């Protein structure tokens, strides 16, 4: 299982040991009682208390916010900027009465797109804005998550060459690069 500790620090101000403690609480059972006290592990318990509740037996369990935190940290190589770009794209697609699709996959695909295209987050954002201005291409793009990468058959591997957005970038590379550099 992959957890993005950089996102944990940037978005939630949690150190890796605190994230591991929260994960330990999630996996804790009666016979696996490692997670007795955050202080025993040298952790400032005040920062992570908001993610933990006690059940009826007095055992520590993750609350909904803690469960959501761990889900949000599973994004592979994503950053705060990737989440912002995904939120923007989702909002724009909803305005057009189109489907957003799988939001978690969208965030992960934006991060992978950024890596494979060698564009900065600002560059990806500008590219998406330019794509959304082209009405002829929007007709073929029914789902936001498929704009970045549409899975082929049962494989869920990211393929930048199959990306509608990347093909748009290659066709308009000079114009988009100039726009990115001017910002």
Image: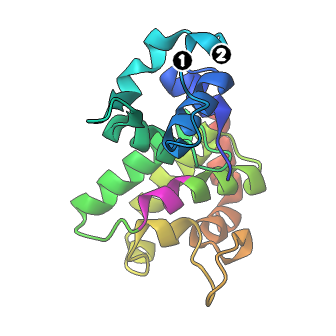
Position of 89 relative to 63 (above/below): below
Find out whether the residues at labels 2 and 1 contact each other: C-beta distance under 8 Å. yes
Name the residue at the bottom extreme. Answer: 153
Position of 38 relative to 84 (above/below): above
Q: Residue 91: x, y in percent?
A: 30, 52
Identify the residue shown where x is 60% and y is 59%.
109
Identify the residue shown where x is 40% and y is 53%.
89
- Residue 151 within the magenta-colored segment of the rendering: no
Position of 154 relative to 177 (above/below): below
Q: Residue 31: x, y in percent?
A: 56, 43
Q: Residues within 10 Å of mark 1 (few under 14, many from 20)?
A: few
Q: Residue 63: x, y in percent?
A: 34, 37
Q: Nearer the viewer, residue 36 or 48?
A: 36
Among the 4 quarters of the image, the one containing residue 21: top right
Residue 138 visible somewhere in the drawing: yes
Among the 4 quarters of the image, the one containing residue 73: top right
Q: Residues within 10 Å of mark 2 (few under 14, many from 20)?
A: some
Cα distance between the residues tagged 2 and 1: 7 Å
Residue identifier under label 2: 41
Identify the residue shown where x is 22% and y is 68%.
97
Among the 4 quarters of the image, the one containing residue 27: top right
Residue identifier under label 1: 37
Q: Which residues are magenta?
A: 102-107
Residue 183 visible somewhere in the drawing: no
Identify the residue shown where x is 32% and y is 70%.
99
SS at mark 2 in the image? helix
* Quadrant of the rendering where the C terminus is positioned: top right
Magenta span: helix, strand or loop, mainly?
helix
């Amino acid at each position: 299982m992959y957890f993005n500790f950089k996102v944990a620090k940037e978005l939630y101000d949690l150190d890796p040991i605190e994230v591991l403690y929260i994960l330990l609480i999630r996996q804790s059972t009666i016979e696996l009682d490692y997670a007795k006290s955050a202080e025993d592990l040298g952790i400032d318990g005040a920062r992570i208390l908001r993610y933990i509740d006690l059940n009826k037996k007095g055992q520590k369990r993750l609350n909904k916010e803690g469960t959501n935190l761990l889900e949000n940290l599973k994004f592979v190589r994503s950053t705060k900027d990737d989440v912002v770009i995904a939120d923007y794209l989702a909002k724009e697609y909803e305005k057009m009465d189109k489907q957003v699709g799988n939001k978690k996959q969208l965030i992960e695909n934006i991060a992978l797109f950024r890596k494979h295209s060698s564009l900065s987050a600002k560059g990806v954002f500008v590219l998406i804005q330019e794509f959304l201005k082209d009405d002829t291409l929007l007709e073929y793009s029914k789902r936001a998550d498929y704009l970045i990468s549409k899975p082929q058959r049962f494989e869920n591997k990211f393929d930048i060459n199959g990306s509608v957005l990347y093909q748009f970038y290659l066709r308009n590379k000079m114009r988009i690069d100039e726009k990115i550099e001017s910002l």
